[in-house]
Every structure is written in structure tokens, then in C-alpha cells.
């Protein structure tokens, strides 16, 4: 590869409104360009990195016996209707063809792979692992941070079909191990965290999370054991609270002007952990009371997961007054029988509690949750906070910001049931296969590698995914001896199987040095007049910055050793 012939539009200045380091540096290094918010063009250097990422993922998928497919990215809406996800997934792009038929662009491919699985006939064919690299479309409300949150991207998605739960467990574990190898090879440090299944359904899922300030997720991790969970799913071992027996019935407490938990605590000596917080949510159009301990916060995704309702919004004050007769600040569930009540586990068995009386400026004390409140659903609803005890070992949990780089799900039989897939079992009876699904975003992986591997001067690609392994700089394109030596080193490296890019442009050395650093190629060989007069060139490692003068006839061996040490 010759720099003089390639399209590598590097930028000297940071682009405006590129906050994430990966966004800034992939633009500056000439890897990507934005078409519109959330849609990026991949330029030649970006394509080289992307191809190497795909090669690593493909090799590890093939190694666990997965078979590669390619399914369409445009689907008939009707298939999504049959699994109930046409309505449930709000980020789906929808369109009509010229005949007026409803179509969608795939946000994922469970439905479509499952229609192919209808041709599986016998338990003898299971398990099957199927995967593809395919474009996904997601109409994100706020695409941002370059390749980290986009509306169009390549995903490696795979699906497993098994006869029973034990088989699914094995398939899931095989994928988990493959993902750990993939992220290690990509140079991405990954925490494996328990996660919410969201609209996928099923019971268990794990996310692979890369710690990063650019992340949009929070992960609770234990410094003492291997517990890690997305905040959407994390739990803590809360100390039990001992309550006084309380009153024989709730008592009225006049609390003029009191609207907050804190005010009730400071003004009336009712500590926040002795109060019941009452939130009113509209869930699938129905007003619902959501109860938490006064000092606890609602975790929105936990409410979705506990109830299966995705259409949730806080009720408006006028809706609340119409239903309960008071405004927020004086609300409670005592005596409420005509609205559903969902309560957090931390309120179980609590006595002598305080809560709003559904009369403005009035609260109730001496409330016994079991006796006085009709709870329809008990669930884990609270968001853990840093420092709470780890649910496994009790050590104080830490909260770290992270980027999701992979997500693996035990789906169960939701899709195979809805789409009517069965195979014949050993005794001739029809069995519905059980599924898993497993995803890695390719361009997001590229951005995360850039987030993890960069410095002030630019990108520092791990050698396995670098756009080239080595760049040879012809420092003075007008000096024949330099050109001849650089070309000869370039040819020798190529002959030795090294992925090498020669910067043969007629540019000042300073420009070439800056571009080499910015584009992050792991090894730089600089061929200049002065060193060459002594029969040497300068070899620099991008990651360590270490410089060495190396005799021309030893350059290939030296470079190969450097690449090997870097994990080539
Ligand atoms: Zn722990």
C-alpha cells in the first residue's frame, strides 16, 4: 500500500462537536466521515480496521462450530407482528413498498433466523449455531458520540437452537467463552455483567462491558469478588431494618406545606428509611402506584422487567389528583383498592412507616405495609448506589461507567413458539427448540478500541486490528538513496508477509510523522538521509514511543520481533 495512492484525509484540527475521543480521532485520522447524525461512511483505513475485527470475530465463531449466513436487512412487518415485537420495539424503521405492503428494517434478526429454523426436522440436527454480519437499523432518539451510538451499523449476531435448557446452557457458555477470546484479541478489556433482557424476553443475559468515561451505562462491580451487574439489574445486600410494632391503625399527621421525603424527615423526625415513597406511573394507559422506601430511587428498567410493560410514563398532576384526591407530596397507597400497586422488596414486612394520606398536607404514621396496603406485585425496583454491600460477599459495591460491547441472551422458546418451529424428539413427539442470541456491534467495537487505545497524538491501534502493521516513511522523497532504501525495506517487509504501508508522498517529514502518529500504525520505520549515511534507519514503536537505530539489513527481523512482542 502506498500512501500517495490512498485516500487518507487526515485533519490537523479537532472537528467541532466530536466529544468522545474515538469520534474525534477516527474523523481526524481519516477513518470515517459522517453522512448525517448516526450514519457514517467507512473510508479505506476504516475498512481495513473493520475487516480485521470481522476476521477475528468470524474465526472465533467458526471455532465453536457456528455457521455463517446472510439474511436480508429488510423484512415483512408481518413476521414481527407474530412475535409481538412490531409494537414493542420503538426504534424500528418502518416503510411501505410500492404495493403498500408494510416492511421494516431489521433492528435484530431473531424472527428471521427463526423462520429459517422452521426447516429443522429432528432433534438429531440440534444444536445449531447460526451467525451473520449484517447491517442493523435503529431509529435512536439521540445518535451521538460517533460510532458509539448510531442508527445504522454492522452486527455480528448469532443464534443457537437447542433441544432443552441444558443444551442452551452449554451453547450460552460456548458463546461466553468465544466472546471473552474475541475481546481479548481485539484489545478490549471486558467486564462480564448481569443485564436486563429488555425486549428480548427470556431469563438470563450477560453484557460485556468496557470501562470508559464515554460509556452510557453504569455497572455495579465488586472489588472483592467477581460480581458485576448493569445498574438496570444490580442488587445489593441491604441490612434488614428493625421496626417498632407501631400503632393498631394508621394515624393522621397534619404536615402543612410538606411535599418531600426530606422535609418530612427533618421536620417530623421520620427518617427517610421509615417512609414509603409513592410514585404514580401510567403503565399501558393504566394508573399504577409504585412504592419504594423513602431513601430509595426507582430503577426504570427494573419496573419494565418486573411488569413486562414498556409503555410507561409518570402520571400528570391532574391525572393524579383525579384518581387519588391529592397532589404529589401527599400520596400513599393505604386504603387504595382500585389501582394496581407494585412495591419494592425493601418494603416487605415493614411496620410503623409514614406515607402520604391522599389529602394535601396530611400524612399517615404507624403504617404496617402488610396490614394496610394491598400490594399486587412485589418486585426488585430500586437502583443500587455506590458503597452498598455486594449481594455475594458484602464488600462495598463500586459504580463504574462503561460501554456495552456485547450482549448474550438465553431467549427461551418465545420466538420458536410464536413462529411455530418444532422438531421431532427421540420418541417421535414434537419439541419446540429453545434459543439463545448473541450480538457484537462491529463499528462500536472499533470505536471502543479507539477509546481504550489512544494518546494526545492520536490512535494507538493494537497490532491485530491496526490498518497496517508497519509504516515506512520516506523522509526525503528527493534523495534517491533514501527512496531506494525505503522502497527496498517496503518490498522486503511485504515479502516477509508484513502488512505495510509506505508513506511515499512528497511531504515534509513533520507531516509524515504527525500522520503516522494520528493513524496509530504500531511500528514506524523512518528512512532519512542522515541515518542512512551510517547504514541505519529509525524504528519507533507507537505504543511505547521507544526509538531505536537499526542497521538497514536487520530491519525486517527487528520489525518482526516487535510485532511478535506486540501479540501479532
Ligand atoms: Zn462481592
Image: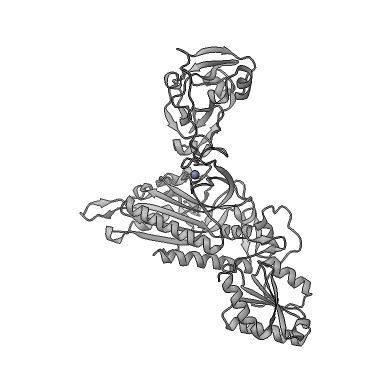
Residue at far left of view: 427
Q: Is residue 169 left or right of residue 351?
A: left
Q: Nearer the viewer, residue 490 or 336?
A: 490
* Residue 557: quarter of image: bottom right
Q: Is residue 157 left or right of residue 360?
A: left
- As drawn, 550 above or below 441: below
Quadrant assignment for the C terminus: bottom right
Is residue 144 visible to us here? yes
Residue 436 location, x and y as percent? 40, 53
Is residue 71 visible to us here? no
Residue 336 location, x and y as percent? 46, 19
Residue 106 location, x and y as percent? 49, 54
Q: Nearer the viewer, residue 317 or 177?
A: 177
- As drawn, 553 above or below 400: below
Q: Nearer the viewer, residue 138 or 467?
A: 467
Q: Is residue 513 left or right of residue 434?
A: right
Quadrant assignment for the N terminus: bottom right
Q: Nearer the viewer, residue 555 or 154?
A: 555
Query: How many numbered marks have been drawn onto this rendered protein structure?
Result: 0
Amino acid at each position: 500500500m502506498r500512501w500517495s495512492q490512498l485516500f487518507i484525509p487526515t485533519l490537523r484540527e479537532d472537528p467541532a462537536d466530536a466529544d468522545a475521543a474515538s469520534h474525534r480521532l477516527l474523523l481526524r485520522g481519516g477513518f470515517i466521515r459522517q453522512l448525517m447524525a448516526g450514519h457514517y461512511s467507512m473510508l479505506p483505513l476504516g475498512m481495513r480496521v473493520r475487516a480485521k475485527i470481522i476476521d477475528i470475530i468470524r474465526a472465533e465463531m467458526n471455532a465453536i462450530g457456528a455457521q455463517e449466513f446472510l439474511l436480508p436487512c429488510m423484512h415483512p412487518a408481518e413476521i414481527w407482528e407474530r412475535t409481538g415485537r412490531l409494537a414493542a420495539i420503538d426504534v424500528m424503521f418502518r416503510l411501505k413498498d410500492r404495493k403498500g405492503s408494510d416492511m421494516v428494517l431489521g433492528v435484530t434478526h431473531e424472527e428471521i433466523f427463526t423462520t429459517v429454523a422452521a426447516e429443522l426436522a429432528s432433534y438429531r440436527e440440534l444444536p445449531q449455531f447460526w451467525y451473520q454480519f449484517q447491517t442493523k437499523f435503529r431509529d435512536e432518539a439521540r445518535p451521538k458520540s460517533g460510532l458509539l451510538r448510531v442508527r445504522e451499523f454492522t452486527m455480528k449476531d448469532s443464534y443457537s437452537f437447542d433441544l432443552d435448557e441444558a443444551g442452551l446452557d452449554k451453547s450460552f457458555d460456548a458463546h461466553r467463552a468465544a466472546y471473552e477470546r474475541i475481546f481479548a484479541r481485539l484489545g478490549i478489556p471486558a467486564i462480564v455483567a448481569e443485564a436486563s433482557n429488555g425486549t428480548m424476553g427470556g431469563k438470563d443475559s450477560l453484557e460485556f462491558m468496557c470501562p470508559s468515561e464515554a460509556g452510557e451505562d453504569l455497572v455495579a462491580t465488586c472489588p472483592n469478588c467477581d460480581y458485576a451487574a448493569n445498574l438496570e439489574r444490580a442488587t445489593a445486600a441491604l441490612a434488614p431494618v428493625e421496626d417498632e410494632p407501631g400503632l393498631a391503625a394508621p394515624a393522621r399527621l397534619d404536615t402543612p406545606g410538606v411535599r418531600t421525603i426530606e422535609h418530612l424527615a427533618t421536620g417530623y423526625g421520620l427518617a427517610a428509611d421509615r417512609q414509603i415513597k409513592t410514585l404514580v406511573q401510567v403503565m399501558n394507559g393504566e394508573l399504577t402506584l409504585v412504592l419504594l422506601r423513602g431513601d430509595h430511587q426507582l430503577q426504570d428498567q427494573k419496573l419494565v422487567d418486573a411488569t413486562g410493560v414498556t409503555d410507561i410514563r409518570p402520571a400528570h398532576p391532574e391525572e393524579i389528583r383525579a384518581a387519588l384526591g391529592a397532589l404529589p407530596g401527599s400520596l400513599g397507597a393505604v386504603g387504595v383498592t382500585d389501582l394496581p400497586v407494585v412495591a419494592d422488596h425493601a418494603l416487605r414486612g415493614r411496620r410503623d412507616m409514614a406515607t402520604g394520606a391522599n389529602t394535601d398536607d396530611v400524612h399517615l404514621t404507624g403504617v404496617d405495609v402488610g396490614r394496610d396496603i394491598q400490594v399486587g406485585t412485589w418486585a426488585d425496583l430500586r437502583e443500587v448506589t455506590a458503597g452498598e454491600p455486594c449481594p455475594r460477599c458484602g464488600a462495598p459495591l463500586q459504580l463504574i461507567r462503561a460501554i456495552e460491547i456485547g450482549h448474550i441472551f438465553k431467549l427461551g422458546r418465545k420466538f420458536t413458539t410464536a413462529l411455530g418451529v418444532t422438531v421431532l424428539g427421540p420418541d417421535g413427539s414434537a419439541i419446540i427448540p429453545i434459543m439463545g442470541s448473541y450480538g457484537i456491534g462491529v463499528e462500536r467495537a472499533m470505536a471502543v478500541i479507539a477509546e481504550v487505545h489512544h494518546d494526545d497524538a492520536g490512535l494507538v491501534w493494537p497490532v491485530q486490528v491496526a490498518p497496517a502493521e508497519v509504516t515506512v516513511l520516506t523522509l526525503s522523497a528527493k534523495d534517491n538513496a533514501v527512496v531506494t532504501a525505503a522502497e527496498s525495506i517496503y518490498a522486503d517487509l511485504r515479502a516477509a508477509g508484513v502488512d505495510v504501508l509506505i508513506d511515499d508522498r512528497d511531504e515534509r517529514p513533520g507531516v509524515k510523522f504527525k500522520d503516522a502518529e494520528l493513524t496509530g500504525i504500531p511500528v514506524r520505520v523512518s528512512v532519512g538521509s542522515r541515518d542512512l549515511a551510517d547504514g541505519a534507519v529509525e524504528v519507533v514503536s507507537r505504543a511505547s514511543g521507544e526509538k531505536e537505530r537499526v542497521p538497514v539489513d536487520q530491519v525486517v527481523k527487528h520489525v518482526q520481533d516487535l510485532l511478535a512482542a506486540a501479540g501479532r
